[in-house]
Amino acid sequence: MARKKTPRQSRRRGPRKSGGKTTRSSSRSTARTKAPPAPGAAAAKGASPDRVRAILEKLDEAYPAATCALHHDNPFQLLISTILSAQCTDERVNQVTATLFPKYPSPEAFAYANPRELEKEIRPTGFFRNKTKSVMGASKLIVEGFGRKVPQTMEELLTLPGVARKTANVVLGTAFGVASGVVVDTHVQRLAGRLDLSRQEDPKKIEQDLMQVIPQDRWILFSHQLIWHGRRVCQARKPRCAECNLESLCYSKDKVV
């Protein structure tokens, strides 16, 4: 008579004893947990102190007297010019303000101007309707809220219509010598990436990266130097790498030499 087979019963492994202590083994390997990234872990590798120092020295050699390219006679004119410079070249703004400022010589003149007339004056700078609202709004607040004087703090400047950190940094640094931050325009944004000083794309985050690696007493000059270098050498479409004195320090994918 055939012997009836019975199903095997699975053996359950009991607790293992190790060194007198009972431990349970698991068939799954314990996953290694990664430590959370430290602040700044995603920062650019090219922002080491020695490399930053070398970049600053090269910029000093090329542009020892770099300054703001917007023509102005006082802080208020600089404020208006900077508002107009959004999405426009400084050269075009200077052409417009050459006739604009004589016609509107004071904050009051801008604050209570005829909007249609002002739009015609600043039309060549682009986005003229929005810029007219910003110029008139900022001028009115300066007249009625700040005693006809341009504010000298970041917090107060940011209350003016049409003024964000870039404009405020330009005014504070150029007109008052206050290093409140780093001006991040299109040139600074592009060069900060090419020089691997920041891997961010948002201007505010780029500014924060630059403020961490550039000494504060260099913020104002550094901004002007990078803008000059971006206009003259490290241009967006065709960088002139063969003429660049930073070429030996640059490893950008946009490099053409």
Image (cartoon, rainbow, N blue to C red):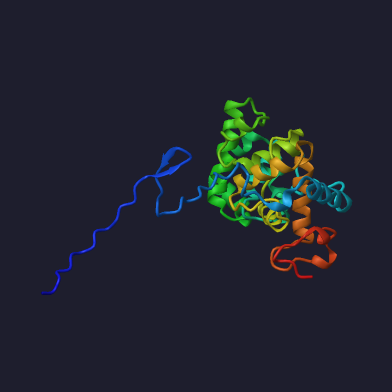
The percent coordinates of residue 45 (x first, y second) are 70, 52
Q: Quadrant of residue 149?
A: top right
Depth check, front residue: 46 or 247: 46
Q: Please indicate whether residue 30 sits to the left or right of residue 226 in the image.
A: left
When asked about the image quadrant of residue 133, the answer is top right
Q: Residue at x 74, y 46 (%)?
A: 223
Q: Residue furthest left?
A: 1
Residue at 55% in and 44% down: 35
224 or 15, nearer to the observer: 15
Residue 56 screen position, x and y as percent: 82, 48
Q: Is residue 101 above or below residue 96?
A: above
Residue 76: x and y in percent read: 69, 36
User: Residue at position x 37%, y 45% from top?
Assistant: 15
Residue at the bottom extreme, as displayed: 1
Q: Quadrant of the C terminus?
A: bottom right
Residue 105 appears in the figure: no
Judge whether residue 223 can be spotted in this image: yes
Identify whether 74 is placed above or below 222: above
Residue 165: horizontal and vertical position, in percent?
62, 41
Q: Nearer the viewer, residue 158 or 148?
A: 158
- Compare residues 222 and 121 and report the one nearer the observer: 222
Specify the farthest residue to the front. Answer: 1
| Left-right relation of 89 to 134 | right
